[in-house]
Amino acid sequence: MKQRINLLIAFSVIALIVLSTVQCYLVKTTYDYKVAQFHTEIKNTIARISNNYSDIDSVIVARKEALYKQLSENYIQGKNNKSEVKTYILENEYNDVLTQKIQRKFQRELPNLKIDFAIVLNKFVLYQNAKKIDTIFSEKPFIQNKLYGNLISLNHAFLVRSYVGTTNGTYANQDYKLLTEDSMYVSVIDWEMIILGRMTFVLILSLLSILTLITLFVIAIKALIKQKKVNDIKTDFINNITHELKTPLTTLGISTRILERKDIRDNDENFNAIVDTISRQNNRLQNLIDQVMANSLAENGIELQKEKTETEDFLLSIIHDFKITFPKVNLQTDFQTQKTILVLDKFHLTTAFLNVLENAVKYGSHKILIKTRIVQNQFSISIEDDGIGIEKNKQSLLFEKFYRVEQGNLHDTKGLGLGLYYVDQIIKAHQGSVSVVSDLGKGTQFTILLKV
Ligand code: ADP
């Protein structure tokens, strides 16, 4: 069963991991799709508001073309070399003015977005009739080749469009054609937040579905483990009660067989001894059955017969009887509550206190200390022993029906796992609480709190 539960947990964890991975993959795909969609939107909008930056300031663009023509002719004449041409183009004086104009246009047309941009020069190629193509300049888009714009890096920017320009001219009776190519890169500030904002619904939905799955999984596994625990506890109970019943029954069987012998019946002393044994075993059987009955009745609610009780006197009478039964146990008291009167069911509480005291002896204690205190308006009774103690991880289960720490090890100490369950039920019926503090090997302290 345990192996099956472990296998089930392992499979469920794997299924959860696979599902979560698929979910993450789907979210990532949606994210990529949203990013692509966002870029397309920006591209289309920018294409709509500006076909070419000549429509933003035609005078500047015309001046730029004149400069390009001038530089081409200088190059043909040999006045400027390739790198000088590039430097002159990039150092153009219209840079700031055109940057500001484009920026303003973006602000006007796309008021909700903060856009940084750069127009970089990629190509500057001369075609002369007689000669072969002369590439003065052709590079991949670099921020260093920025003509206009306020972007300082192309890293997070995306390409919006490329502008190809041709200029025809004649120099020294030779026609030439100039081909230029610029690319506009755009970066929208906080674009990640915009995309995440658009994905809120998808994110919340997938997070909720994963959380629901995990919660359902945890609930199912918890129920399964609890079920297993209950099963184990019940099996233990059946084993224990069978064992407990066997001893008196065997003794009764033997005693009856002895009684059948005439020589025993004729000897009064022997006869009385056997009858005593039968009576003791009979009482033991009766006690066992009473214990089981009392606890099955507890399920239907305990009916208390409460009366005003002088608590210290009541405790002392229990201790007195206990000392007669266990004369070797060193039992000490430390009462600091001065004759507190509480309304209690003496009969049930006596059994409950005796259960705790007898457990102390049963589980290895020789010295017991009973303290009473008033703690935050509650009457506190603590029963401290120096017995074998209880492991920390078992302490929360002690008050469960049929629970025994000594599971499986039936013959060490006898019991049905009902004693503390009964204590808990009785104290709860008095609107009180019982708790345990214990160190394995050092001892155990039970504290009972009752309303004053
Ligand atoms: P049981 O019939 O087994 O004694 P209880 O309900 O009285 O059943 O106690 C439950 C379990 O708690 C016991 O099996 C025992 O292992 C542990 N226990 C109870 N009291 C003590 C104690 N004073 N010291 C150590 N272990 C204890």
Image: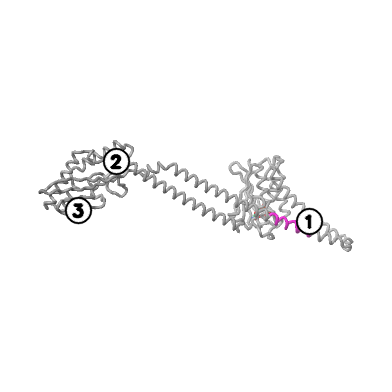
Q: Is mark 3 within 8 Å of ligand 1?
A: no
Residue 309 part of the magenta-drawn span: no
- Name the residue beneath numbered marker 3: 135
Circle 2: residue type: Ala
**Residue denoted by label 2:** 47
Quadrant in which the N terminus is drawn: bottom right
Question: Which residue is drawn at the image coordinates 26% and 52% (left, top)?
Answer: 140
- Mark 3 and mark 1: span between their CA atoms? 115 Å
Query: At 82% from the left edge and 60% from the top edge, which residue is drawn?
Result: 255
Residue 6: name its quadrant: bottom right
Stretch of the chain drawn in magenta: 237-250
3 or 1: mark nearer the eye? 3
Camera-nearest residue between 96 and 280:
96
- Give x and y (percent) for residue 67: 16, 45
Numbered label tally: 3
**Residue in the foreground of this view, choosing between 337 and 256:** 256
The image shows residue 313 at horizontal and vertical percentages of 69, 45
Q: Amino acid at mark 1?
A: Gln
Q: Which mark's residue is nearer the viewer, 1 or 2?
A: 2
Asked if residue 268 lies left or right of residue 320, the reply is: right
Question: What whole-number distance in Å separates the C-alpha atoms at marks 2 and 3?
Answer: 29 Å
Dot 3 and dot 1 residues touching (CB under 8 Å): no
Name the quadrant where ligand 1 sits: bottom right
Q: Main secondary structure of the magenta part?
A: helix
Q: Which residue is mark 1?
A: 281
Amino acid type indicated by mark 3: Thr
Residue 47, image x, y percentages: 29, 40
Reply above or below: 139 against 52.
below
Q: Residue at x 51, y 54 (%)?
A: 14
Spatial CA distance of label 1 from label 2 is: 102 Å
Q: Are there few (<14), some (14-19), or many (20+) residues within 10 Å of tag 1?
A: some
Specify whether 50 is left or right of 376.
left
